[in-house]
């Protein structure tokens, strides 16, 4: 998916680039490598291992129900997707979480690498939340694998700078989050930042009233990022990106503006 979306974005980009591409991509991917290595060596269990452990100890809702496996697997994927939607909303409105989530939003351009650009602390927080959901619901291990594949693939897809025919976008966004739909979420305008939280299924934003169809300034003219982080330093240098949560900016954008 990473290779496909990079190639598609190169052949048919939706927007022009606004910052130098190489250093920004290098920093984004270095952050991915850092997060992957730290997760592997600092977490004693993966989400799949937690699912297997919960099954062995009969923990969680599904482990006390008798359901066909296919129903349990599909329900598990849907509930995990809902949990990620709820987590995303929480990371915007709970100040301590927002401090780390800002790293994702401070990117001045949007492409497939943006879908993987998250502060290391946020990655660990997200994994802890996911493990808690898996344990409390007793989600089957195969649901966890399917969801991880879907979440990573759709995150790379909907953050990509690719041009979709408008008809295809309209059809696809009835079921999944498209690049044009999610791009609104990365606008500098707070009321647009606080919309379109979904990563995979698009229904949650409609159900909970956070759906916004298009950016006010259009996809070509809209500004990506945060008002208080408009320098390339936060977009293309790894160390300043990691320091964002620990700096206090004047006139800092909040996510509580309607």
Image (cartoon, grey):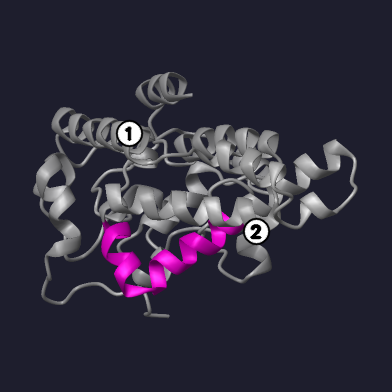
What number of labels is visible?
Answer: 2
Give the residues drawn in magenta, as a range.
Answer: 83-102
Q: Residue furthest front?
A: 57
Q: Residue 209 in the image: state x and y as whole percent.
A: 61, 71
Q: Residue 245 in the image: state x and y as whole percent.
A: 20, 61
Q: Residue 34 in the image: state x and y as whole percent.
A: 25, 34
Residues packed near mark 1 inside 10 Å, few (<14), some (14 to 19) or many (20 plus): few
The residue under the point 36% across, 32% down is: 40
Q: Which residue is mark 1?
A: 41
- Left or right relative to 95: residue 46: right
The residue under the point 16% across, 58% down is: 244
- Left or right relative to 186: residue 174: right
**Where residue 136 is drawn, which disc sits there?**
2
Q: CA distance from mark 2 to mark 1?
A: 25 Å
Q: Secondary structure at mark 2?
A: helix
Q: Quadrant of residue 35?
A: top left
**Where residue 125 is drawn, which disc sits there?**
none
Magenta-drawn stretch, dominant element (helix, strand or loop)? helix
Q: Is residue 76 above or below residue 162?
A: below
Q: Is residue 87 visible?
A: yes
Of 24 and 143, the residue lying toward us: 143
Q: Is residue 145 above or below residue 123?
A: above
The residue under the point 77% across, 48% down is: 75
Quadrant showing the C terminus:
bottom left
Residue 105 is a magenta residue: no
Of 14 and 174, the residue lying toward us: 174
Q: Residue 163 in the image: state x and y as whole percent.
A: 47, 33
Q: Secondary structure at mark 1?
A: helix
The residue under the point 39% across, 41% down is: 43
Q: Is residue 167 visible?
A: no
Q: Quadrant of residue 243?
A: bottom left
- Left or right relative to 169: residue 157: left
């Amino acid at each position: 998916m990473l290779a496909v979306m990079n190639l598609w974005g190169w052949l048919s980009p939706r927007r022009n680039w606004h910052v130098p591409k190489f250093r920004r991509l290098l920093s984004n991917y270095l952050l991915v490598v850092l997060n992957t290595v730290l997760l592997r060596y600092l977490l004693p269990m993966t989400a799949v291992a937690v699912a297997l452990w919960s099954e062995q100890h009969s923990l969680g809702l599904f482990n006390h129900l008798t359901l066909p496996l296919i129903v349990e697997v599909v329900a598990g994927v849907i509930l995990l997707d809902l949990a990620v939607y709820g987590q995303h909303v929480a990371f915007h409105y709970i100040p301590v979480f927002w401090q780390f989530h800002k790293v994702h939003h401070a990117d001045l351009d949007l492409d497939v690498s943006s879908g993987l650009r998250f502060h290391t602390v946020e990655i660990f927080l997200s994994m802890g939340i996911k493990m808690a959901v898996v344990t409390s619901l007793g989600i089957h291990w195969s649901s966890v694998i399917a969801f991880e594949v879907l979440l990573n693939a759709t995150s790379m897809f909907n953050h990509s700078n690719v041009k979709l025919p408008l008809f295809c976008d309209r059809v696809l966004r009835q079921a999944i989050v498209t690049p044009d739909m999610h791009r609104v979420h990365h606008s500098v305008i707070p009321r647009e930042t606080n919309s379109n939280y979904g990563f995979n299924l698009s229904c949650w934003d409609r159900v909970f009233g956070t759906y916004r169809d298009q950016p006010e300034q259009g996809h070509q003219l809209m500004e990506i990022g945060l008002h208080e982080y408009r320098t390339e330093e936060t977009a293309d240098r790894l160390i300043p990106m990691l320091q964002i949560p620990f700096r206090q900016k004047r006139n800092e954008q909040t996510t509580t503006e309607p």
